[in-house]
Image (tube, rainbow, N blue to C red):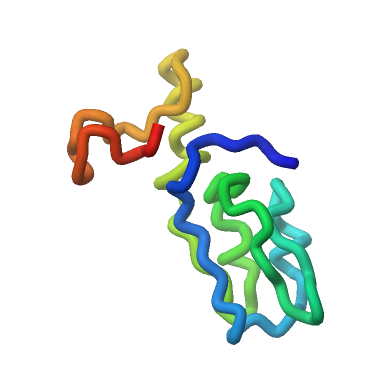
Amino acid sequence: MSTKYLKNVVTLQLDSEACRGCGRCLEVCPHGVFVMEEKTVRIIDRDGCMECGACQRNCPFGAVTVTAGVGCANAVIRGRLKGTGPDCGCSGGDRGGPNCCGS
């Protein structure tokens, strides 16, 4: 099981109809959020996704989408640079609310 950074904020999406079961996303995902079932992929751990974008960049069928650099991976990096916990930079309400990160 992978680390959970921020709950229910991941932008990861999978179009199961576009998926052809090549398994490339399983190979490149650093946190194992995908599983192969009956020649198609399914997301099993959405909150484990760090939104690095490797799955989207490597899917030859465009079945995976994720907005890389806006979610958990970015929040963790910002927090480490500041010496704090995960920080998505939107706690002041600049992206639609006082607590848009879900933390």
In the drawing, does residue 97 fall left or right of residue 55?
Answer: left
Residue 16, by quadrant, is bottom right
- Residue at left offset 46%, top offset 27%: 86
Q: As displayed, is residue 90 above or below residue 60? A: above
Seen from the viewer's position, the closer of residues 8 and 50 is 8
For residue 53, side relative to residue 25 (left or right): left
Residue located at (61% from left, 58% from top): 54
- For the image, the number of numbered tags is 0
Residue at 65 percent across and 62 percent down: it is 43
Q: Nearer the viewer, residue 9 or 30?
A: 9
Q: Quadrant of residue 38?
A: bottom right
- When the figure is inspected, residue 56 is found, relative to residue 40, above or below; the finding is above
Instruction: Please say if 8 is above or below 80.
Output: below
Classify the position of the N terminus by image quarter.
top right
Q: Where is residue 12 in the image (x, y as percent from the top left)?
A: 51, 59
Q: Where is residue 78 in the image (x, y as percent from the top left)?
A: 43, 28
The one of 24 and 6 positioned closer to us in this rendering: 6
Residue 92 placed where, x, y %?
Answer: 20, 29
